[in-house]
Amino acid sequence: MENKLKETNLSNKIHSGKVRDIYELNDELLLFVATDRISAFDVIMDEVVPGKGIILNKLSSFWFNLFKEYKSHYVSSGLDFDFSSFRNHNNIDSKILQRSTIVKKAKRIDMECVVRGYITGSAWNEYEKYQTINGMTFEKNISEAEKFNSPIFTPSTKANEGHDEPLSKEEGQNLIGLKLYNQLEEISINIFQKAHSYCLDKGIILADTKFEFGIIDNAIILIDEVLTPDSSRFWKSEDYKEGKSPNPFDKQFLRNWLNEQTWDKNPPPPNVPNEIINKTLLRYLEIYEIITNDKLKI
């Protein structure tokens, strides 16, 4: 039987997002399930990428464990957690456990923390038109995929439904407060730089990524997913050359196909052919194995 998971229906579901289903275990803990759903342009596709949730879950767990110096909500992978004392969740199917993480409850900060090391994607599109990125003016004659002198922080709104919208620095500071904004910018860039260095040693460029943060006991903690193909853009170092963005190890492959369709980026999405689904899965698998040195069978 093909190992795929589009939806889950356990007890005490409190949220179902673009990819993750979230369940309450008790007053302190949540169960995050990374399904095989895939979204692009903030729209969930009708098709799934079989095993994608396993990859996302294991890769996030890898980064949380690698960067333990940063406080996070991560407690355990689902497969390693003892559910015996959780009456409503002590008989969970292994297909779900493979895609699950146990996390501490946190108060989410409603701003996505995007860090860019290179000018590509939506940042490049904006720069081409206006010579700005998130409202910041940049010099002329920057090439596509050019590396910034230092990573830039380009946050966005955190939308429960619909599109996330870019925030200027002033808008971000007004949204969450000057002090918290500056703290998140510093932490985000710090993690990005460490991850970028780690990836370079593996022959991979981390071009950009997004982080999410929350608050537990007045402390800022890293939440949600970390440095996965859903939240990040990875390139092969050997493919990199200024002037054109390399083929990424992420869902940009799907986005590129969607951009070729006559679709207005609103639901319903077009039907994604199996060829695109399979190629997307192979990209996810490959970047997982390069980063972790772990061979994964889906």
Image: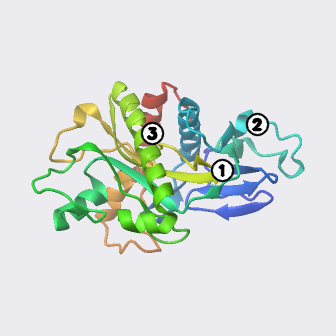
Q: Residue at x 14, y 47 (%)?
A: 243
Mark 1 vs 3, N-terminal side: 1
* Quarter-of-image position of residue 129: bottom left
Q: Mark 1 points at which residue?
A: 33
Location of the N terminus by quadrant is top right
The location of residue 212, given as percent across then percent down, is 52, 53
Secondary structure beneath disc 2? Answer: loop
CA gap between label 2 and label 3 equals 27 Å
Report crowding for label 3: few under 14, some 14 to 19, many 20 or more residues within 10 A (C-alpha): some
Task: Name the residue at 37% across, 26% down.
Answer: 202
Q: Mark 3 points at which residue?
A: 191
Tell how many labels.
3
Please tell me the numbered disc located at residue 13. none
Q: Are marks 1 and 2 in contact (CB under 8 Å)?
A: no
Disc number lying in front (1 or 3) = 3
Residue 219 point in image, percent of width and height:
62, 48
- The alpha-carbon separation of the residues under discs 1 and 3 comes to 24 Å
Q: Is residue 14 left or right of residue 174?
A: right
Q: Where is residue 252 in the image (x, y as percent from the top left)?
A: 36, 52
Residue type of the residue flagged with mark 1: Val
Going from the N terminus, do you reach mark 1 or mark 2 first? Answer: 1
Instruction: Name the residue tied to disc 2.
Output: 81
Say few, some or many: other residues with alpha carbon within 10 Å of mark 2 (under 14 / 14 to 19 / 20 or more). Answer: few
Would you say the residues marked 1 and 3 are in contact, meaning their CB atoms lie under 8 Å apart?
no
